Image (tube, helix red, strand yellow):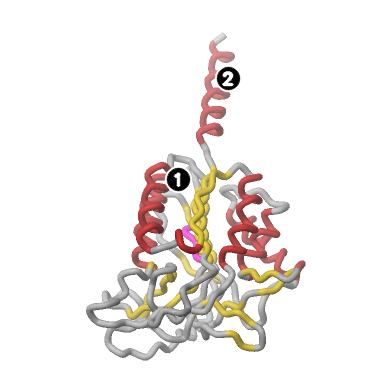
């Protein structure tokens, strides 16, 4: 009798744990920057196409999705919505963050970057050029700020869940069309002191992130190294970020779980299978495990 009761309680515990684990996604995609305004100077890209491709696939896997597209993807709205998203996150959740936008290096002022530049995601209302008293970088979503939210999410998720962070942007591109190619990013660093951006030539494609027994593990996937450009690909007349496209193809036949190594393996296999990856562009991963 006691043994049966024990088995019943174990089954109940496992059932409640499984039911408690939710899948939640926060997706940001920008295509139409205001190219007419002086100071913006961003070319239009196809970040919204990425999100439109990924959203139904993630929904089919049971993800509850929050999306911010184009005009919704202002700096204030991104940070306020990700804060709300974080507050609703629970222990054991599988969480997927995705950013398809321009990227720009920002001069590092606190000395935590070896190459002297922070990486940043460019919201739709961020200017490219510093102008004292007018625009001083307050709407750039730097890696320092993003990591604060990542840390909070990892604490909320706890060790039984997992966090994925995908960045299909570029920090060393040309911000122009060349040979019918669309590049995400810019070679112009956002600088407060007229510093010239020189991309790091570090050839590493994998980095370790601090782990904690109180936090979830995390996997960052980035479309290219800091010294490379992120070139969009063209499929059936539409343009996509190469990382977003290959993740979508992977998730069409692979269910996202806490097994991040298997996910990465499948993405790399997909890249080989589809052949849809720009030359001279390397996938970058950062892991806590």
Residue 202, placed above or below residue 263: below
Name the N-terminal-most of marks 2 and 1.
2
What separation in Å lies between label 2 and label 1 (alpha carbons)?
Answer: 25 Å
Position in image of residue 159 (x %, y %): 45, 45
Residue tagged by mark 1?
159
Mark 2 and mark 1 in contact? Answer it, CB < 8 Å: no
Position in image of residue 254 (x %, y %): 69, 51
Q: Nearer the viewer, residue 120 or 253?
A: 120
Residue at (53%, 63%) from the top-left corner? Answer: 29
Position in image of residue 175 (x %, y %): 51, 83
Residue 58, placed above or below residue 234: above
Q: Describe residue 285's horizontal placement relative to residue 232 as left or right.
A: left
Residue tagged by mark 2?
7
Position in image of residue 100 (x %, y %): 53, 66
> At numbered mark 1, what does the secondary structure look like: helix, strand or loop?
loop
Q: Nearer the viewer, residue 23 or 238?
A: 238
Task: Please give the range of residues in magenta.
Answer: 285-289
Q: Describe residue 57's horizontal placement relative to residue 108 as left or right.
A: right
Residue 271, placed above or below residue 159: below
């Amino acid at each position: 009798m006691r043994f049966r009761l024990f088995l019943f309680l174990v089954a109940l515990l496992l059932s409640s744990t499984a039911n408690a684990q939710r899948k939640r996604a926060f997706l940001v995609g920008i295509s139409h920057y205001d190219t007419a305004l002086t100071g913006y100077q961003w070319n239009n890209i196809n970040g919204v196409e990425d999100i439109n491709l990924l959203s139904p696939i993630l929904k089919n896997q049971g993800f509850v999705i929050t999306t911010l597209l184009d005009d919704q993807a202002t700096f204030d709205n991104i940070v306020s919505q990700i804060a709300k998203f974080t507050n609703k996150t629970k222990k054991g959740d599988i969480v997927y963050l995705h950013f398809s936008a321009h990227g720009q290096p920002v001069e590092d002022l606190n000395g935590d970057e070896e190459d002297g530049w922070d990486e940043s995601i460019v919201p739709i209302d961020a200017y490219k050029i510093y102008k004292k008293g007018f625009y001083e970088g307050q709407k750039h979503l730097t890696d320092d700020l993003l990591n604060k939210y990542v840390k909070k999410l990892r604490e909320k998720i706890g060790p039984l869940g997992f966090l994925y962070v995908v960045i299909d942007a570029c920090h060393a591109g040309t911000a122009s069309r060349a040979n019918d190619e669309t590049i995400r990013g810019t070679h112009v660093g956002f600088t407060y002191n007229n510093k010239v951006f020189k991309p790091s030539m570090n050839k590493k494609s994998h980095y370790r992130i601090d782990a904690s027994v109180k936090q979830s593990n995390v996997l960052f996937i980035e479309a290219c190294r800091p010294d490379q450009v992120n070139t969009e690909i063209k499929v059936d007349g539409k343009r996509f970020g190469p990382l977003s496209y290959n993740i979508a193809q992977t998730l069409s036949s692979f269910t996202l779980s806490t097994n991040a190594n298997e996910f990465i393996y499948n993405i790399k296999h997909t890249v080989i299978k589809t052949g849809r990856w720009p030359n001279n562009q390397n996938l970058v991963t950062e892991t806590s495990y």
